[in-house]
Structures are given as structure tokens and as C-alpha cells.
Image (cartoon, rainbow, N blue to C red):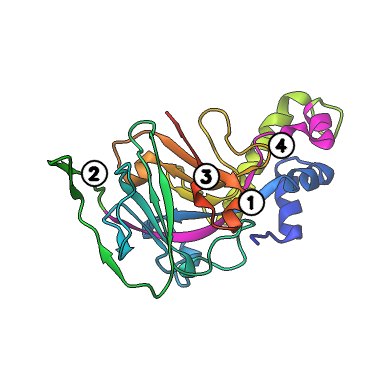
Amino acid sequence: MTSIDEALLLETAANHGVPAPVVRELMARARPCLYLVPYDEVPESRRGSTRPAARTGGLPALPDGVNWPDGKEPLVLSVDCAALPRGVLDIELPADGHLLVFTEIEYPPESSAVLHIPAGVRTEERPASYELDGEAGEIRVYEPRTLYPVPGLNFDGEWEGGPQISAFLDGNGNGDGGGAQDALDSFEEAIGDLAFGGHRPGVCVQIGGFSDPWDMAPDTGELVLLAQLAGQAIDYNVFTMNLIVGTREGIAAREYAGLQYEQQC
């Protein structure tokens, strides 16, 4: 689990004018995540221990008898589960093998798929060309980019609803109503950067945690975030946010057919 030393947490809060009871309430609404970023965005303090764990784009390596999903969506992400840091996430991913994500990032997908390819299974790279009803077709292939995992921490989008936080924002705590919002926003940003080990990336792939949507959050009720993919993390010219959610139980059981996909732009 991503954690921050309590003394450092309270010191950071004091620097931003946020009282300790508000800090504890805010942290209760935090969840750990993994950011998948290019090597040059890995904080220097983590570069000595990090190793590649994912790739955007490219062609899928699939076992015998397994082909591109029927919708012919592009491969946008491949995750080496064994290369992810252990004990960080609060959702259960496979301990090994690869997760492959097929979806459209340029317009709302009609269908999408997440496949788990077990470790040790013989695989072969599949071509992007195909034939359908006697006509040749070509699946979009994005430029491969190697990504590295960095633990992080983010917050429930509705964190302002807690009683201590509400009182602080209303000016009834140790702050005033006008400056309390700025203090909380700057503290939240500072804590996220501390957990990441540097300035958090604005454009990236995220596994787990809370979503950072451009519109309504899809991870509500029993649904939690499996992955969030910024279009620009896959193709610099694509400005979309692509979110994949499911239940904790379904994700743990690898029931990926039940996942839900949402695109925001």
C-alpha cells in the first residue's frame, strides 16, 4: 500500500494551513494507484529500482486459437503483471501473465476487451491485417511506448462531503471559508506529489485508485477503477480520457467481460 510518513503528512498539512482532523478525514478518502509513465517521467529517486512493466500500442502476442477481439479494436495497452510493484493496489490483479487492453481511443468504442494471457503460455504476435467477407481490412496499430510503474495516491472526487472538511470549508474549523478551499487543493496536490516522489504526470495511464475524469466519474457505487488511459499517453494527437471500471469481485475473479468502458472528451 502506498503510504506517507505521518509526521511528514502533518508537517505538509501545517505548511498549507490544514488542521490535523481534516487531514485524517481526507486521507480516509484516498486510494493507492499505479501510474504507468515513460522513463523520463519516473522520479529520479525511483529510477534505480524501477523496471518496465507495460507498453502502449504495438501488436498483441496471443496464444494459439486466440485472435484479435471480434470488434477489431486496436491494442492500446499491455501490462506485465509480474513486473508491477507488489502490495500497492487495493484491487486484485493477476500475479503474473499479461493484461491486454483493446479499445478505441479516438471515438467512443462500440466494443472493447481486456484479455489475460497466462504466464508460460506459448504466444505469437498477430498481424493487424485481416479479411472479412472477402475484403481486406487493417487494424490501427499505435506506436509502441515502454512504460514504467510508479506508486501514487489519489482522492475520491467527493471528498469535500466529510464533516471535518465541510466545517473547515464553511469557516467553522481552523480556517476561513475563502482560503480553506485553496488550502485543501494545494495540500491534496502536495500529498499526491509526495506519494509519487515528484510532480505527478498530467498525461498518463493509471491502474487502480480513483478516476480523474473530465466529466462524471464512472467509478461510483460498487464500481471501481481498473484503468484510466489518457488518449495522449497512447497517441499525442488524441485528446480523450478512456476509463475502464468494474466491481472489485469481478476484477479479482478475472471476469473481464463484465467491465464497463467510458470515453470522455
Dot 1 crowding, Cα within 10 Å, few <14, some 14–19, many 20+: some
Task: State which tag comes first along the sequence, 3 or 2.
Answer: 2
Residue at (33% x, 34% y) in the render: 106
Q: Mark 3 points at which residue?
A: 259
Q: Which residue is at the far bottom?
A: 120
Dot 4 crowding, Cα within 10 Å, few <14, some 14–19, many 20+: some
Q: Distance between the residues labelled 4 and 1?
A: 21 Å
Q: Nearer the viewer, mark 3 or mark 2?
A: 3
Q: Distance between the residues labelled 2 and 4?
A: 39 Å
Amino acid on which disc 2 is placed: Arg
Amino acid on which disc 1 is placed: Arg
Dot 3 crowding, Cα within 10 Å, few <14, some 14–19, many 20+: some
Amino acid on which disc 3 is placed: Leu
Left/right placement of residue 119 relative to residue 137 reads: right
Q: Mark 4 points at which residue?
A: 159
248 shown above or below 18: below
Amino acid on which disc 4 is placed: Trp
Q: What residue range appears in magenta?
A: 144-169
Q: Name the residue under label 2.
A: 140
Question: Residue 235 placed where, x, y %?
Answer: 30, 42
Of helix, strand and loop, which one carries label 2? loop
Of helix, strand and loop, which one carries label 1? helix
Q: Which residue is at the far right?
A: 172
Left/right placement of residue 242 relative to residue 219 reads: left
123 shown above or below 179: below
Q: Distance between the residues labelled 3 and 2?
A: 22 Å
> Is residue 199 visible in this depiction of the protein?
no
Q: How far apart are marks 1 and 2 (CA)?
A: 31 Å
